[in-house]
Image: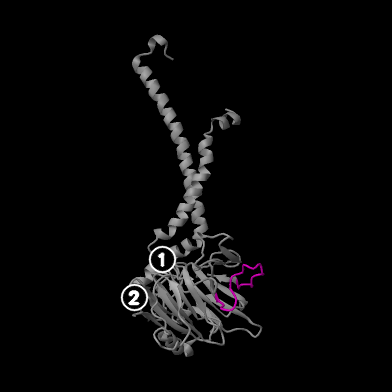
Amino acid sequence: MLSHSALTPVHVVLHKVQKRIAIVFSILGDWAAFIGAVLILGLGTSWYMIDVGTPLTTIRQGPWIGWTSGGRADADPYTRAHFTRLGSLQLSAENLLTYVAHTDSDGRRLHSSCDYSVEGREPGTNWWSITVFNDRGELIANPAQRYAFTSQTIAIRPDGTFVVTLARDARPGNWLPTGGAGRLALTLTTIDATAPVLVKSGAAPKPLPVIRRIQCR
Amino acid sequence: MTLRDRLGQANWQLILAAPVAAGILHICATLAAPYLTADSAYSRLAPALPVNKMRVLSEITPGSEPLPFLSPDARYALCRFDTSAGPVTVTATLPPDPGWMLAVMSPQGDNIYASASTPGRTTPITLALVPSEEHFLGVTPEARGVERGADPPLALAAKHGIVVIRAPDRGFSYQRDSEASLSAARCSATHF
């Protein structure tokens, strides 16, 4: 430690500079924390609500997610941003509702290395279809040229249920080839002109098909 | 240093301002998101479509999908309309089969009009797309001394957008029927 007599003007200046740097760092630290918190909270919540959705904007049943205001003139900003970013054609959810599933009913990511059964009962709408895509929304090329089943092309069991098998190799019945697409996305489109397909009245939603993993390679 | 000291030294102004600033950023980011992408459905489709003319898209196959997640469960007829030079008339008849739809989509993706087919009866649709609701639609048939043949067209205010007609895939046997119905739809500029 220096005594008063040993303090030179240089030491005094250095001490002042040191103190000022400490103050600046203290202020900068507060501001850095503030900016970081604002960015994470503001952008993070915006991304989540646009990309993933919440019960305010989506209807969820098992692995199926449908955006309830898609294509509507009174759509909320999250739905509007979701479909604009996705770049998909969105017809009014008052008549047409598309559910998307990226996982099976146990929450595991759909992948072409596994076989799946999609089992359910007709959704009770005028018309419906099931289509398999890769996770970029592209069709999966296959020699059978089979990409979708509709309520008019699917084989229904006598009890009104159906099974669609997603598999790389041919399967009997309603088979949708998945090739080597990697991650998969399954869409279920329902159209109804007579009654809105949206479930906003509080009535229990019709059960959607269950997606079960059969086996993986 | 105790917790009390630390709390006493904390910059409470910044701590309280953070959620407010985050909320403002959240709203700005959400509202700006649609404008920060160049790949909306409209911007992908519009360059390939003639103006004020209905075009039936070819079957959707792998590698030729015009949009992501566009299923081959349907065939589509599209008309990119531009009403800046005058009204555009759209006529179509949805067959009495389930799954048919006609929608007028704005560049932002909103359906300003949508109608689905009703099983058991055909659904004739006539729309007059005008740049604004006050636009002159021409003299009525009665004023021209002509008998009104059908219901007046439904006027919709829209400067730009795409009319989408969706025909469901009913299997190979019905493909020609579906294509004929799509080809019969009309979209044209109206001249007085």
What secondary structure predominates along the stretch shown in magenta? Answer: loop
Mark 1 residue type: Ser
Q: Residues within 10 Å of mark 2 (few under 14, many from 20)?
A: some
Residue A113: image x %, image y %?
50, 69
Q: Position of residue A191 (x, y in %)?
A: 55, 77
Front residue of A186 and A141: A186
Q: Nearer the viewer, residue B54 or B76?
A: B54
Q: Which residue is mark 2?
A: B51
| Quarter of the rendering containing residue B2 | top right
Residue B66 placement, left or right of B116: left
**Residue bounds of the magenta highlight:** A190-210
Q: Is residue B98 above or below residue A138?
A: below
Residue A26 percent coordinates (x, y): 46, 32
Name the amino acid, label 2: Val
Q: Chain of mark 2?
A: B
Q: In the rendered image, which residue does mark 1 sit on? A: B40
Give the residue at the far top of this rendering: A5
